[in-house]
Image: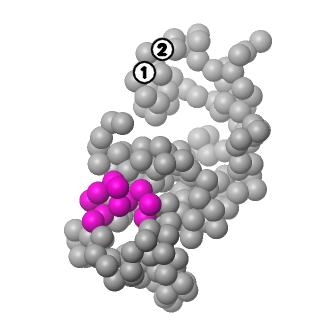
Amino acid sequence: MSNFPSWYIEITRKQVETQLPDWFVDKFSPTQAPAPMTKQARTTGPDEPNLSKSPRGIRNNNPGNIEIGEKWQGIATGDAIQSFQQKEDRFIVFSSPEFGVRAITKILQTYNVKHGLNTVRGIINRWAPPFENDTEAYVNSVAEAIGVGPDVRIDTSSAHVLNPLIGAIIRHENGEQPYSEETITAGINLAFNKEE
Protein backbone atom coordinates (compact mmCIF):
# COMPACT_ATOMS: atom_id res chain seq x y z
CA MET A 1 0.00 0.00 0.00
CA SER A 2 1.35 3.40 -1.01
CA ASN A 3 1.92 6.20 1.48
CA PHE A 4 1.18 8.78 -1.22
CA PRO A 5 -2.27 10.40 -1.59
CA SER A 6 -4.53 9.22 -4.37
CA TRP A 7 -4.42 12.59 -6.15
CA TYR A 8 -0.95 12.07 -7.57
CA ILE A 9 -1.08 12.00 -11.32
CA GLU A 10 0.94 9.67 -13.48
CA ILE A 11 4.49 10.96 -13.57
CA THR A 12 7.16 9.64 -15.89
CA ARG A 13 10.81 9.85 -14.92
CA LYS A 14 11.29 12.49 -17.61
CA GLN A 15 8.52 14.64 -16.13
CA VAL A 16 10.04 14.26 -12.66
CA GLU A 17 13.45 15.32 -13.91
CA THR A 18 12.20 18.31 -15.90
CA GLN A 19 9.34 19.67 -13.80
CA LEU A 20 10.20 19.01 -10.17
CA PRO A 21 12.96 20.66 -8.14
CA ASP A 22 16.34 18.94 -8.04
CA TRP A 23 16.00 18.23 -4.32
CA PHE A 24 12.87 16.17 -5.02
CA VAL A 25 14.47 14.18 -7.84
CA ASP A 26 17.57 13.57 -5.71
CA LYS A 27 15.53 12.50 -2.67
CA PHE A 28 13.32 9.93 -4.39
CA SER A 29 14.65 7.06 -6.43
CA PRO A 30 12.31 5.60 -9.09
CA THR A 31 11.15 2.95 -6.60
CA GLN A 32 10.27 5.59 -4.02
CA ALA A 33 8.41 7.91 -6.39
CA PRO A 34 4.64 8.05 -6.15
CA ALA A 35 2.82 5.14 -7.70
CA PRO A 36 1.43 5.96 -11.15
CA MET A 37 -2.25 6.69 -11.35
CA THR A 38 -4.56 6.34 -14.29
CA LYS A 39 -5.57 9.46 -16.19
CA GLN A 40 -8.40 10.63 -13.94
CA ALA A 41 -9.26 13.85 -12.25
CA ARG A 42 -7.51 13.88 -8.91
CA THR A 43 -9.66 13.88 -5.85
CA THR A 44 -9.38 16.87 -3.59
CA GLY A 45 -8.19 16.96 -0.06
CA PRO A 46 -9.73 19.14 2.66
CA ASP A 47 -7.73 22.26 1.68
CA GLU A 48 -7.74 21.81 -2.09
CA PRO A 49 -10.21 23.24 -4.57
CA ASN A 50 -12.27 20.88 -6.66
CA LEU A 51 -10.54 21.72 -9.92
CA SER A 52 -13.28 20.23 -12.08
CA LYS A 53 -15.61 22.96 -10.79
CA SER A 54 -13.04 25.77 -10.92
CA PRO A 55 -13.04 28.49 -13.58
CA ARG A 56 -11.37 27.48 -16.85
CA GLY A 57 -8.22 29.54 -16.17
CA ILE A 58 -7.63 27.88 -12.78
CA ARG A 59 -8.56 24.40 -14.02
CA ASN A 60 -6.18 24.71 -16.97
CA ASN A 61 -3.30 26.25 -14.96
CA ASN A 62 -3.72 29.31 -17.19
CA PRO A 63 -4.91 31.95 -14.71
CA GLY A 64 -4.33 34.78 -17.19
CA ASN A 65 -6.50 33.07 -19.83
CA ILE A 66 -3.66 33.33 -22.32
CA GLU A 67 -4.58 32.39 -25.85
CA ILE A 68 -2.77 29.87 -28.00
CA GLY A 69 -0.15 31.45 -30.23
CA GLU A 70 3.25 31.59 -28.58
CA LYS A 71 5.28 28.49 -27.81
CA TRP A 72 5.30 28.90 -24.04
CA GLN A 73 7.32 26.81 -21.61
CA GLY A 74 5.21 24.38 -19.62
CA ILE A 75 2.38 23.79 -22.09
CA ALA A 76 0.58 20.54 -21.24
CA THR A 77 0.01 18.22 -24.16
CA GLY A 78 -1.39 14.75 -24.76
CA ASP A 79 -1.62 12.59 -21.66
CA ALA A 80 -0.42 15.47 -19.46
CA ILE A 81 -3.84 17.09 -19.90
CA GLN A 82 -6.09 15.80 -17.14
CA SER A 83 -9.74 14.84 -17.64
CA PHE A 84 -10.90 17.90 -15.67
CA GLN A 85 -8.93 20.19 -17.95
CA GLN A 86 -10.14 21.31 -21.34
CA LYS A 87 -8.07 21.13 -24.49
CA GLU A 88 -9.37 24.15 -26.31
CA ASP A 89 -8.84 25.84 -29.62
CA ARG A 90 -8.41 29.26 -28.00
CA PHE A 91 -6.74 28.94 -24.58
CA ILE A 92 -3.53 27.22 -23.47
CA VAL A 93 -3.42 24.45 -20.86
CA PHE A 94 -0.24 24.70 -18.76
CA SER A 95 1.31 21.83 -16.81
CA SER A 96 1.30 23.85 -13.56
CA PRO A 97 0.05 27.20 -12.26
CA GLU A 98 3.65 28.38 -12.02
CA PHE A 99 4.03 28.10 -15.80
CA GLY A 100 0.79 30.04 -16.23
CA VAL A 101 2.13 32.78 -13.94
CA ARG A 102 5.44 32.70 -15.82
CA ALA A 103 3.59 33.42 -19.06
CA ILE A 104 1.70 36.33 -17.47
CA THR A 105 5.01 37.74 -16.24
CA LYS A 106 6.65 37.42 -19.66
CA ILE A 107 3.71 39.19 -21.31
CA LEU A 108 3.85 42.03 -18.76
CA GLN A 109 7.60 42.39 -19.36
CA THR A 110 7.00 42.54 -23.13
CA TYR A 111 4.29 45.16 -22.66
CA ASN A 112 6.79 47.33 -20.80
CA VAL A 113 9.89 46.82 -22.95
CA LYS A 114 8.35 46.55 -26.42
CA HIS A 115 5.22 48.69 -26.07
CA GLY A 116 6.15 51.11 -23.26
CA LEU A 117 3.13 50.08 -21.17
CA ASN A 118 3.88 50.77 -17.51
CA THR A 119 0.56 51.84 -15.99
CA VAL A 120 -2.39 49.69 -14.98
CA ARG A 121 -4.52 51.41 -17.63
CA GLY A 122 -1.96 50.81 -20.39
CA ILE A 123 -1.38 47.19 -19.40
CA ILE A 124 -5.03 46.22 -19.00
CA ASN A 125 -6.15 48.03 -22.16
CA ARG A 126 -3.80 45.78 -24.10
CA TRP A 127 -4.44 42.65 -21.96
CA ALA A 128 -8.22 42.89 -22.15
CA PRO A 129 -9.15 45.18 -25.05
CA PRO A 130 -12.47 47.04 -24.94
CA PHE A 131 -13.90 45.27 -27.98
CA GLU A 132 -14.41 42.12 -25.87
CA ASN A 133 -14.17 43.30 -22.24
CA ASP A 134 -15.38 45.92 -19.80
CA THR A 135 -11.84 47.23 -19.76
CA GLU A 136 -12.52 50.27 -17.57
CA ALA A 137 -13.96 48.06 -14.81
CA TYR A 138 -10.93 45.75 -15.19
CA VAL A 139 -8.53 48.71 -14.94
CA ASN A 140 -10.27 50.06 -11.82
CA SER A 141 -10.40 46.61 -10.19
CA VAL A 142 -6.67 45.98 -10.67
CA ALA A 143 -5.61 49.53 -9.73
CA GLU A 144 -7.64 49.37 -6.52
CA ALA A 145 -6.31 45.89 -5.67
CA ILE A 146 -2.68 46.99 -5.92
CA GLY A 147 -3.28 50.41 -4.37
CA VAL A 148 -2.28 52.75 -7.21
CA GLY A 149 -4.10 55.08 -9.54
CA PRO A 150 -4.84 53.67 -13.01
CA ASP A 151 -2.36 56.08 -14.65
CA VAL A 152 0.46 55.84 -12.10
CA ARG A 153 3.66 54.38 -13.51
CA ILE A 154 4.54 50.95 -12.08
CA ASP A 155 7.75 48.93 -12.31
CA THR A 156 6.90 45.59 -13.91
CA SER A 157 10.51 44.48 -13.61
CA SER A 158 10.07 44.24 -9.82
CA ALA A 159 8.72 41.06 -8.25
CA HIS A 160 7.34 43.22 -5.42
CA VAL A 161 5.10 44.98 -7.96
CA LEU A 162 4.41 41.94 -10.13
CA ASN A 163 3.18 39.70 -7.31
CA PRO A 164 0.12 41.80 -6.38
CA LEU A 165 -0.42 42.89 -10.01
CA ILE A 166 -0.55 39.30 -11.22
CA GLY A 167 -2.75 38.32 -8.28
CA ALA A 168 -5.21 41.08 -9.22
CA ILE A 169 -5.21 39.98 -12.88
CA ILE A 170 -5.85 36.38 -11.81
CA ARG A 171 -8.75 37.45 -9.57
CA HIS A 172 -10.35 39.51 -12.32
CA GLU A 173 -9.87 36.86 -15.01
CA ASN A 174 -11.27 34.02 -12.89
CA GLY A 175 -13.44 35.56 -10.20
CA GLU A 176 -11.05 34.10 -7.62
CA GLN A 177 -7.35 34.00 -6.83
CA PRO A 178 -6.59 30.63 -5.22
CA TYR A 179 -2.78 30.70 -5.39
CA SER A 180 -0.38 31.38 -2.54
CA GLU A 181 2.14 34.19 -2.73
CA GLU A 182 4.79 31.47 -3.01
CA THR A 183 3.17 29.99 -6.14
CA ILE A 184 3.01 33.39 -7.81
CA THR A 185 6.59 34.17 -6.78
CA ALA A 186 7.77 30.83 -8.19
CA GLY A 187 6.14 31.67 -11.53
CA ILE A 188 7.71 35.13 -11.55
CA ASN A 189 11.09 33.60 -10.76
CA LEU A 190 10.67 31.18 -13.68
CA ALA A 191 10.18 34.21 -15.93
CA PHE A 192 13.26 35.90 -14.47
CA ASN A 193 15.22 32.62 -14.70
CA LYS A 194 15.75 32.58 -10.93
CA GLU A 195 15.67 29.61 -8.60
CA GLU A 196 13.76 30.33 -5.41
Q: Residue at x 65, y 33 (%)?
A: 9
Left or right of 9, for residue 26? left
The magenta-colored residue range is 155-165
Contact between labelled residues 2 and 1, with CB atoms less than 8 Å apart: yes
Q: What is the chief secondary structure element of the magenta stretch? A: helix
Residue sitting at the far front: 147
Amino acid type indicated by mark 2: Lys
Under circle 2, the secondary element is helix
Where's residue 1, x and y in %? 77, 12
Amino acid type indicated by mark 1: Trp
Q: Residue at x 74, y 28 (%)?
A: 6
Residue 37 visible somewhere in the drawing = yes
Q: Quadrant of the C terminus?
A: top left
Q: How is the image coloured?
A: one colour
Which quadrant of the view contains residue 162?
bottom left
* Mark 2, other Cα within 10 Å: few <14 / some 14–19 / many ≥20: few
Marks 1 and 2, how far apart at CA: 6 Å
Residue under label 1: 23
Q: Residue at x 67, y 24 (%)?
A: 36
Residue 27 has which mark? 2
Under circle 1, the secondary element is helix
Magenta run includes residue 3: no
